[in-house]
Amino acid sequence: MSGRLSHDRPGVWAVALQRRQTPEGVNNVEEIAKVDGVDVIHIGANDLLTAMGKPGQFGDPEGAKAIDRVISVAAANGKIPGMGGDRHIPRQIEYIRKGARFLTTNSEIAFILTEATRVTTELRRALAEK
C-alpha cells in the first residue's frame, strides 16, 4: 500500500508513505528506501505476521527481526521508520528506542472503545457511591 498526500497550497505539507506488510516487502526494503519522494517506510506487524503464517504472534523473533530490518534500513536511507499493528506498549517503546518515529499505536475504534469504557466505568462508580 502506498499513499501520497499533497497540496499545492502554501503551508500545507506533503508526505509519501510506503507500507510494507509482507515478507516480500521486507526483502525489498532496500530498493524501496532508494525511491526518491518516499518519506516514510512503515511496516504493519499484524499484517506481516499473518503473511508469515504467524497471525497474532507478536514478539515472534522472526517477525521482530523483519520489523527491526525495516526500521534500520529506513533510517539508514534518510526515511522516517514507521511501524504499527502491535498494541503492546512495551514493544512499542522498544521499537521507538530502535528508531521507529511514525507509530500507528492503535486503531480509531480501539481508542474510542477505551475512552468510552473509562467514562462509563467512572460514571457507574460515581452513581454507586451516591
Image (cartoon, helix red, strand yellow):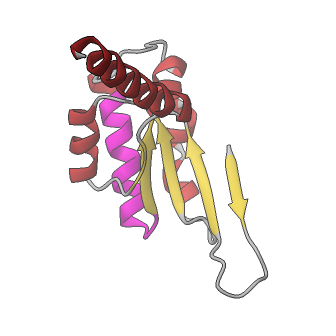
Query: Residue at 27% of width from left, 17% of height from top?
Result: 125
Q: Is residue 1 left or right of residue 87?
A: right
Q: Nearer the viewer, residue 55 or 73?
A: 55
Residue depicted at x 54% and y 21%: 51
- Residue sitting at x 60%, y 64%: 38
Please report the bounds of the magenta region as a residue range. 63-79
Q: Position of residue 63 (x, y in %)?
A: 36, 27
- Marks counted in the figure total 0
Q: Is residue 85 left or right of residue 22?
A: left
Q: Quadrant of the N terminus?
A: top right
Q: Is residue 68 above or below residue 4?
A: above
Secondary structure mostly taken by the magenta-highlighted segment of the chain: helix
Q: Position of residue 128 (x, y in %)?
A: 27, 11
Q: Residue furthest bottom?
A: 10
| Farthest-out residue, right | 8
Residue 103 spot, x, y in % from top left: 41, 48
The C terminus - image quarter:
top left
Q: Is residue 83 above or below residue 24?
A: below
Q: Is residue 118 magenta?
A: no
